Structure formats: C-alpha cells, structure tokens
Image (cartoon, coloured by chain):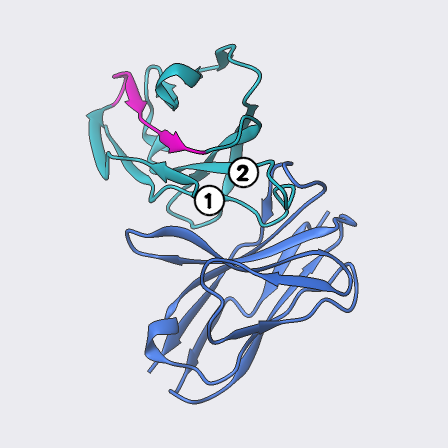
C-alpha cells in the first residue's frame, strides 16, 4: 500500500512564484488535511477536507488554497510564495474524524 | 480554545534509562481524543497511540507506556529502558468532538526532542 503520497519531496521557489503541492491517498479516506511544520512550532493545520467537494480553513490558511475534486487527491496551492512560507508541509488522511492520521513523508519547501 | 503543552523542549538521557515525556492539554469538551506521534530523524510522522477521554486506563505496549489523568489534564508517555532508536521528536496532539465533530484535525504540541545517548 502506498498510503499517502506527497510530491515533490523538495522544492525551491522564488518570492512571488506559485506552485501546487500534490497529495494523494489510496485508502479511500474521507478526511484529509494539510499541516505545516516549523522549528519549535509543532504542526499547524492549514486546510482540511471532510470529503470530495468540501474544504475548510484551519489555523493558518492565509496564502494557501485547496480543492478536493476526488476522494484521492487534495492539492495545496501557494498563490504567491513568500519567505514566511518556507516550511515542511505534511499531508494527512484518516478514515474518521478522530481516527489516527496517516501522514505523507512531507515536502520541504524553501522560498528565496 | 484547545491547547496542548509539551513543556520539555529537549531531553537527553543515557541508553537504558527510563524517560517520561509530559503532555498537558486544555479543552472545554467532555469528549476528546489524545494522540502521540513519533518523528524520527528521517522526518516521517509515526502514530503511536490514541486515547479517548472516557478511557483512563493506562496502556503499555512493550517498552512504551502511557499515563492518562483527566484530573490533571495530562497524558504522559514513558519509555522504559530507552534505546538509541528511540531518539526522535515526540508530539502529543488533541482532537475535540465539538460541533464540527473534530473534522478539522489535530492540535499539536510543539514537540519534545528526545536524545538517547549510547
């Protein structure tokens, strides 16, 4: 089982560029989430989805956009990259609201 | 608002020592779930345990044990006879069963970096 797959693993962007972080899961999970991890900050929720066509904002949504057209995919878009968005991004899925989250391996993003 | 506090930023012990990682949480809900995750140096996040607010039984899994105490809002994690492979960042997290049903994911503590020296 692939579980949760994130691409790319590493990316360097220039300020102002846009890009999409991809996330796909093959476990038929309805719930998916995006987190960012910064040193000393733990993981913070960016956006989440409870099923295809349904998304909502988490704790730190500014500068990011999401969509959920299929159960499997939950891409995260950076609209205009800023140095403050330099971080490690994790996508996660789970089978129910309070079930354990399955995390992807993360995307390390640097904004210059 | 919910909150998770891991006051220990970093702990360093010698192999074979026992070590306890502290987790204190705040929530207004009577129904909630607590989690522990491990993040080894390779960077992935590994689920260790989930506990719901109605189950205060302590749990033991091999060298790992968890002590859940609602009276002190704590969910501490103990590693017995630590090993070098236990070196990692450990996160405690909380999910509330409130109006949104917990759909919005987890609130994480900032993590405790555990270093096991050989």
Chain letter tied to blue? A
Chain letter tied to cyan? B
Query: What residue did someone put label 2 on?
Result: B95
Asked if residue A73 shows in the view, the reply is yes
- CA distance separating discs 1 and 2: 7 Å
Residue at x 79% of width, y 65% of height: A70
Residue B22 painted magenta: yes
Mark 1 neighbour density, 10 Å: few (under 14) some (14–19) many (20 or more):
many
Q: Chain of mark 2?
A: B
Residue A51 x %, y %: 75, 56
Helix, strand or loop status at disc 2: strand
Q: Chain of mark 1?
A: B
> Which quarter of the rendering shows the C terminus of chain B?
top left
Cβ atoms under marks 1 and 2 closer than 8 Å = yes
Residue at x 37% of width, y 80% of height: A82
* Nearer-N-terminus badge (1/2): 2
Residue A106 x %, y %: 50, 58
What's the magenta region? B15-27
Asked if residue B64 shows in the view, the reply is no
Residue B103 x %, y %: 64, 47
Residue B93 x %, y %: 46, 37
Circle count: 2
Helix, strand or loop status at disc 1: strand
Closest to the observer, A45 or B81: A45
Closest to the observer, A3 or A19: A19
Residue at x 55% of width, y 37% of height: B96
Residue at x 70% of width, y 40% of height: A96
Residue A106 painted magenta: no
Up/down of B52 relative to A22, above or below? above
Query: What residue did someone put label 1 on?
Result: B107
Determine the image quadrant of residue A111: bottom left
């Amino acid at each position: 089982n692939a579980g949760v797959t994130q691409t790319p693993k590493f990316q360097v962007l220039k300020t102002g560029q846009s890009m999409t972080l991809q996330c796909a899961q093959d476990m038929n999970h309805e719930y998916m989430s995006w987190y960012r991890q910064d040193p000393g900050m733990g993981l913070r929720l960016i956006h989440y989805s409870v099923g295809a066509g349904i998304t909502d904002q988490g704790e730190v949504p500014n500068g990011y956009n999401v969509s959920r057209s299929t159960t499997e995919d939950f891409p995260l878009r950076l609209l205009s990259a800023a140095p403050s968005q330099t971080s490690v991004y994790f996508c996660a899925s789970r089978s129910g609201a309070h079930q354990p989250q399955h995390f992807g391996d993360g995307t390390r993003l640097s904004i210059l | 608002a919910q909150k998770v506090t891991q006051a220990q930023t970093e702990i360093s012990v010698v192999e074979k020592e026992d070590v306890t990682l502290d987790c204190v949480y705040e929530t207004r809900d009577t129904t909630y779930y607590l989690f522990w995750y491990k993040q080894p140096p390779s960077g992935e996040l590994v689920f260790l345990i989930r506990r719901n607010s109605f189950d205060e039984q302590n749990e033991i899994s091999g060298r790992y044990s968890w002590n859940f105490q609602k009276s002190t809002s704590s969910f501490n994690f103990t590693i017995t006879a630590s090993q070098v492979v236990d070196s990692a960042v450990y996160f405690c997290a909380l999910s509330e069963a409130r109006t949104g049903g917990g759909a919005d994911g987890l609130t994480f503590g900032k993590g405790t970096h555990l270093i096991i020296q050989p």
